[in-house]
Amino acid sequence: MKSTLSILASLVLAPCAFATFHEMQIEQVIGGIDGNISAQAIQLRMRVLGQNLVSNARVRAWDAAGANPVLVLDMTTNVTGSAAGSRVLLATAAFTTAVQAITPTFAPDFTITTPIPASYLAAGRLTFESDTGTILWSLAWGGAAYAGSNTGAITNDADGNYGPPFGQTLPTSGRQGVLFTGLARDPSTTNAANYALSAVPATVVGNSGPSYLLGTLQKIVVEQPAGTNLVNGAASVAFGSVAPGNSGSKSFTIRNTGNANLTGLGITFDGTNAADFTVTASPTAPIAGPNGSTTFTVRFAPATAGAKTAALHIASNDATANPFNLALTGTGLTALEDWRLTWFGTTSDSGNAADTFDFDNDGLVNLIEFAFGLNPTQGNSLALPQPRLIAGVFGVTFTQPAGVSGITYGAEWSTTLAAASWTAIADTGTGSTHTFNVPANGNPQMFLRYALTAP
C-alpha cells in the first residue's frame, strides 16, 4: 500500500515541478534604437519546459559599480507559451512605436515603464530575479568599466559566477542588441564568452512566437561595382579617360535592405560638368525589401578635353538618405592623348609614347605619325604627303586626317639642308586642307620639311 501511495504522489507532483520561472536566460538586450535610448527591449528565453510563471519574477538594472539597482519591470502576470525555447519579450513604449512603424501588429509581452538608466548603458548589469531577490541570471557589460558583482544562484550557472562581463557597451546608435549565442538549453559560463553583438538589424521574438526584424521601413544601398557599397555623400566614382566624341559607361546597383518597398527613384546631375554625364538605362521601382535590387547605367561623354567633375543624386523614399549623393569624375582626352593611349597604352608624353620618340625607326617621330594618321609601330615614311614641282612651284597640299586635332601644321624649305638655311612657308590652305608652296626660281634642288607643333 505504501508503494502505491508513493507512486501516486510522484504522479501528482511531477507537473508542478515544471510550472516555474527559474530556468530562464536573459537572451538579448537592446539599449536603444537609432540613438533613442528610451527605445529598449529585453528578451528572456526559457531553458526548459514550463518556465512561464513569470508573475513571480522581476528584472533589475545596476550601475557600473554593481550598485543603485533600478527595478526595470516586476512582471505581475504569466505568459502562455511554456515550451523550451519560448521567449518573453519586455519592451518600452518607444521601442514598440519604432517596431510598429515597420510591423504594425508588433506587441511585446510586457511594457517596460522604467528603462535602463542612460548612465548604466556604457557599463552596468541586468539581473533576472525572483520577487524575493534571488538572482537567477546575470548579464553585465562594459568590460573592465564594470566593477560590480557578477554572482547569482547556481540555477543557471554551475559556479554562480556569471563574470567576467561582456566586453562592450550596450549598443544604442543603431538597431543592434547584445545576444546570447548559445542554445536555449545552455547554462551560463561567462558573459564575456556567452554574448556577442547581434546581427544588424536585430530580431526580437515574443512569447506567441512571431519574430520581428528591427529593419528600417526602406533602406537604400548603392553599389558600384555590384557588391561594393558606396558611402552616401563621401564616395567618388571615376570614369577614367575618354576622348571627346567617345564615351564610357558604368553600371550601378540600387539595393533595398529595408522591409518596405523603396520607391520614388529619380536620378539627377549637377556640378561643373554635369552635362557630360547622362543616364542611359534607368532604375525601376518599387524595389521590394529586403534585398531587392535594380540597376542603372551612367554614360560619360566629355564634350572637351580636361578633368571633369559632377555630382549624382538618387532620390527615393528613404528618409535617411534622400537624396543619396555621389561624386563623379572623369577626364576628357585630347586627340593626341587618345592616340597615345591607343598605340602605347598611356596618355603621357614620355617613353615610347613621347612626341619626339621614333618608335619604329622610320625617321618619323610620334608627333608626325599622329599628325598624318600613320601607324607609329610600322615604318611608313613614304606615306607622308610628298612635295611636287608643278609649273615652277615647289610645294605640297594635303588634308588633315579625320580625328586629328590640336596640331599646328607648318613647313619649311631649303636648297642646301644646312641648319641655317631653312625658311618657313606660309600655309595658304583653308579649313582642314593645308597648302605649302614656294616658287622654284630655277633652283636645281629644293627640300621641304614639316614643322609641327602640339599643345
Image (cartoon, rainbow, N blue to C red):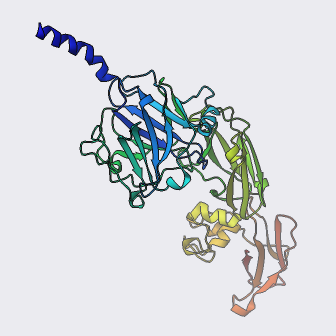
Q: Position of residue 410 (x, y in %)?
A: 78, 76
Residue 430 left/right relative to 363: right
Residue plotted at (77% across, 64% down)? 400
Residue 94 placement: quadrant: top right
Residue 104 left/right relative to 447: left
Q: Residue furthest top?
A: 1
Which of 372/190 is in front? 190
174 up-or-down from 106: above or below: below
Which of 391/226 is in front? 226
Q: Quadrant of the N terminus?
A: top left
Which of 185/58 is in front? 58
Q: Position of residue 46 (x, y in %)?
A: 37, 30
Can residue 345 be seen at all in this image of the molecule? yes
324 up-or-down from 419: above or below: above
Q: Position of residue 406 (x, y in %)?
A: 76, 69
Which of 430/393 is in front? 430
Residue 378 placement: quadrant: bottom right
Can residue 293 be seen at all in this image of the molecule? no
378 up-or-down from 16: above or below: below
Q: Quadrant of the C terminus?
A: bottom right
75 up-or-down from 455: above or below: above
